[in-house]
Amino acid sequence: MKLSHYMKVFPSPDRPGYVLLYSTLRGSVAVIPAQTLASLQEGVFPVEGCETLTRLGMLVEDPGVEREQMRGLIDRANAGPRHFMASVVLNLDCNLDCGYCFEGEFRCGHYMSEETADLLVETLVRERISQGWDVTVSFYGGEPLLSQDLIRRISQPLQAAALHHGVKYAFTLVTNGTLLDRDTALRLLPLGLQGAKFTLDGPREIHDVQRPYASGAGSFEIIAANLAQVCDLISIQLGANFRPENYREFPRLLDQLPLYGITPDKLSVVMFTPVVSTGGCSDFNTGCALSEEPWLMEAAPFLREATLARGYRVPTLKPSACVVELDDNLVIDCTGKFYKCPAFMGSEEMSIGGLREGLQDYRASHGIGNWQVDACLECSYLPLCFGGCRFVSKLQGKSLTEVDCRRKFYDATLEQTVLQNLTYLAPRKKGAAQSAPAQAAPPY
């Protein structure tokens, strides 16, 4: 037996002489005496405890076999359930004027045509639904609720086709929240609406500066009111985009939410993410575009702690891959072009085909499997990273075949994250061990 490659060791904060073992692959935690760890590192295995450590993925028979299994993890995830997820951009128009909007340089008020919408339906029915695939569409923009006629035009035939072929169709919205009131949600529910991502950029005075209406008026009150109206009807993700100069004020947003009736039980997750660039995908991003800036290494755990302390849920720490690695995820823009990530829209060279010509081979251009090198395969953080974010690599002027290494970020933050999980998400029992299933998942 050997210790796993994919494990970190931290001192126990409340038990002198003990250490925490954290499996980055399994999400499991164990507390053992430091002396036991020293014995394991020397190849001496105590009679008691090894079976549990093996079950939690901290001891393995052969690290070489473990490494090869890791090499195939994403392939196994891609071979899993037949569930296709499409992000469909209905328009490049919006009633807000957010200064950091990544679409600012190419937004032109363009709307998807009825012809393109019908071709989208035809393609999804022919290539997915009739072949036994469940389909979930995330309607995106611009602001997708400026195109409610297209939501209906797309969803009604997809819903009917799914029923005919015995599969499932549903859709979600990535919306600024200004137009999703209760009446709108009730109209969309019969068409398959399951959830929505809203955005509130901090407490009211910060949000209204960062996300004003095009007229310059603040949008906080209407978004908060709408959120309160629909959070009992559909699953809600709440995003908030922070900057280095204002992130310490963002916990006040969490204190304001209950004043509108938006208590922790009403939200599926709260995601604080940095505004990293005007080229970023802030509305869609859930933290994939991280950086090594010292302020962010402080801000991320600070905001996570503030969220958990108030009882709200945060994104789960689990094995995750850049969405470009996941076969059954695709972005379809309002002209019918294909992309692997919303942040790539507007860059013609990043298009990988379209509804008319079909999907092109993007494995080389998008650096698929760029993490399959010794430096990554031997890194304890690989399950949390898998080569990082291709968009960050693009922002840095690097080829997408180069990895976006997250080592410095996780060196600075992972211990705090594990301790937060133990404090807020798990019973504090001496010698407690927990395990979570490993999986590959997109960053949003």
Image: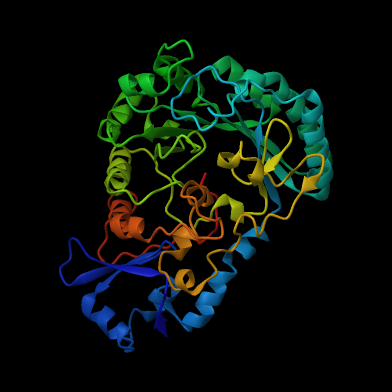
Residue 126 % position (x, y): 84, 43
Query: Which color mode does the image show?
Result: rainbow
Would you place residue 148 above or below residue 281 in this image? Answer: above
**Which residue is nearer to you in this view: 385 or 178?**
385
Left or right, 265 with reference to 139: left
Residue 211 % position (x, y): 42, 22
Left or right, 16 with reference to 388: left
Is residue 217 visible in the rendered structure shown here? yes
Is residue 427 visible in the rendered structure shown here? no
Assign the N terminus to one quadrant of the image.
Answer: bottom left
Q: Residue at x 63, y 46 (%)?
A: 340
Left or right, 274 with reference to 159: left
* Quarter where residue 123 is shown: top right
Q: Residue at x 48, y 56 (%)?
A: 388
Residue 197 % position (x, y): 51, 32
Would you place residue 247 above or below residue 232 in this image? Answer: below
Residue that protrudes farthest toward the front in the picture: 397
* Quarter where residue 9 is shown: bottom left
- The number of discs equals 0
* Quarter where residue 264 is shown: top left
**Which residue is nearer to you in this view: 57 or 430?**
57
Left or right, 200 with reference to 132: left
**Which residue is nearer to you in this view: 123 or 433?**
123
Would you place residue 74 above or below residue 148 in this image? Answer: below
Would you place residue 180 above or below residue 421 in this image? Answer: above
Residue 162 % position (x, y): 78, 39
Q: Residue at x 43, y 17 (%)?
A: 212
